[in-house]
Amino acid sequence: MNRLIYAAALAFALPAFADDLITYTTDQSFDDVVFGVENAIIDQGLIAENVSHVGEMLERTRDDVGSDVVLFEAAEVFSFCSATVSRKVMEADVMNIRFCPYNIFVMQLPDSDMVTIGYRSFPDGAMQDVQALLDAIARSAIGQE
C-alpha cells in the first residue's frame, strides 16, 4: 500500500476514535517525550508497571503478517495505576475496574518530525479524576504544565 493510500485510509479511520482520545503533538524528539513521560509518572509517585514497545513489535512482525506498511517510526504505551485514584473511582463504581491499568501512548509517524502523546478519554463522574491525572502526566511530559 503506498503512502498516499495509507494516509487516506488513516484519515478516514481516525474520526471514529477522535472523540475517545486526548492528544498533544510536539516537535520534541521521541526519546525526549518518552523520558518526559517516565519522569512525569514518577513525579506523580507512580511506577510504570509495563512499557509496551508497540512500534518495535509491529515492525518486527511486519513481514510475518505479509505487510509492507511501516506504521510508526517509534511507538510505546506506558501502563500504570494509582492506588489513591483507583480506589476512589472504584469506590464510586466497582465496574470502573475495566479502565485499569491506565495507559499513555507516545508515537511518531514515519517521515514526521512531530511526536504525539495521548490517552483515551474517560466517562463523566469519578473517572474524570483519572483523566485529570493522565492529562497532568501528558502535559508535564512535554513541558505544558
Image: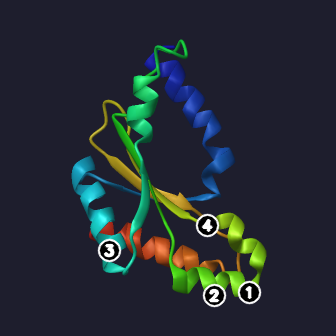
According to the image, what is the colour scheme of the structure? rainbow
The disc placed on residue 92 is 1
Residue at x 71% of width, y 87% of height: 91
Q: Which element type, helix, strand or loop, lies under badge 4?
A: loop
Task: Report x, y in % for residue 25.
Answer: 37, 54
Task: Report x, y in % for residue 87.
Answer: 62, 84
Q: Amino acid at mark 1?
A: Ala
Q: Nearer the viewer, residue 140 or 96?
A: 96
Q: Quadrant of residue 59?
A: top left
User: Mark 4 highlights which residue?
Assistant: 100
Circle 3 Cα neighbour tier, 10 Å, few/some/many (<14 / 14–19 / ≥20): few
Circle 1 Cα neighbour tier, 10 Å, few/some/many (<14 / 14–19 / ≥20): few
Task: Report x, y in % for residue 27.
Answer: 26, 51
N-term mark: 3 or 4: 3
Q: Amino acid at mark 4?
A: Cys
N-term mark: 1 or 3: 3
Q: Above or below — where is 4 with respect to 35?
A: above
Q: Amino acid at mark 3?
A: Ile
User: Mark 2 highlights which residue?
Assistant: 88
